[in-house]
Amino acid sequence: MKKYMVLVLLLALAGCLLCAGGCGSDTSQAKSDLKQGDTLMGEISTQFGELGAKLSNINTEVTNTTEAANAVRQIEEFSTLLTASISKAKAQFGKVKSLKGVADYQKYADLQVKILDNMKTLTTKLNAFLGGLVGVIQSSAGTQDQVNALQNQFQLEAQGITDTISKLAAEANKLKKDKNL
């Protein structure tokens, strides 16, 4: 009889441990962290839209090298703020990595971090493009063909990065919907 009682107690203890493992998950903290990260992602998305508008203004409003240099400098300053926002969002999603029992939330956070990494790469490529553009514009030997070549190269690189971002975003959105994160 004592053997059975010990076995029952061991099974009950094992059941409690399993329940405690599930009950000890950090789900509410993960939800909170992801919600804050998603809010930051929305702000970054808005900032990218503003950046696009500033870029299009270069084509329509810049008529001389001084205006071009000033416009590029403003975009580079804005880009620096955008990079800081990206770092903040990465840190927010990074909080989820240390939580326990929230694998789906961690996978979603990892996808968002990959998106942010690609956004940062895009911003870096943009700054390199703008630096080259200013060099060509300010050079007395600079030609429209050189400007076009820089634009084409940047557009090609940017398209690859934005395609990657779109795929990652689709995967993250599907995971969020499927797992009700």
Image (cartoon, rainbow, N blue to C red):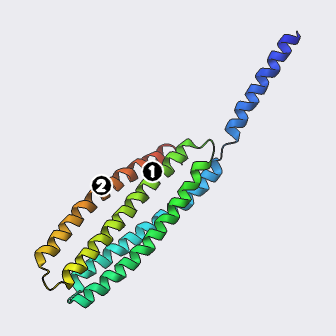
- Residue 47 pos. (x, y %): 41, 72
Q: Quadrant of the N terminus?
A: top right
Q: Amino acid at mark 1?
A: Leu
Residue 102: image quadrant is: top right
**Any part of residue 13 in sight:** yes
Choose between 2 and 161: the one closer to the eye: 161
Q: Is 105 drawn above or below residue 115 in the view shown?
A: above
Q: Secondary structure at mark 2?
A: helix
Choose between 175 and 152: the one closer to the eye: 152
Q: Is residue 17 left or right of residue 113?
A: right
Q: Which residue is mark 1?
A: 111
Choose between 26 and 114: the one closer to the eye: 114
Residue visible at 26% across and 71% down? 129
- Residue 65 pos. (x, y %): 22, 88
Residue visible at 35% across and 74% down? 51
Residue visible at 43% across and 71% down? 82
Which of disc 1 and disc 2 is earlier in sequence?
1
Q: Secondary structure at mark 1?
A: helix
Q: Is residue 38 left or right of residue 134?
A: right
Q: CA distance from mark 2 to mark 1?
A: 14 Å
Q: Which residue is mark 2?
A: 163
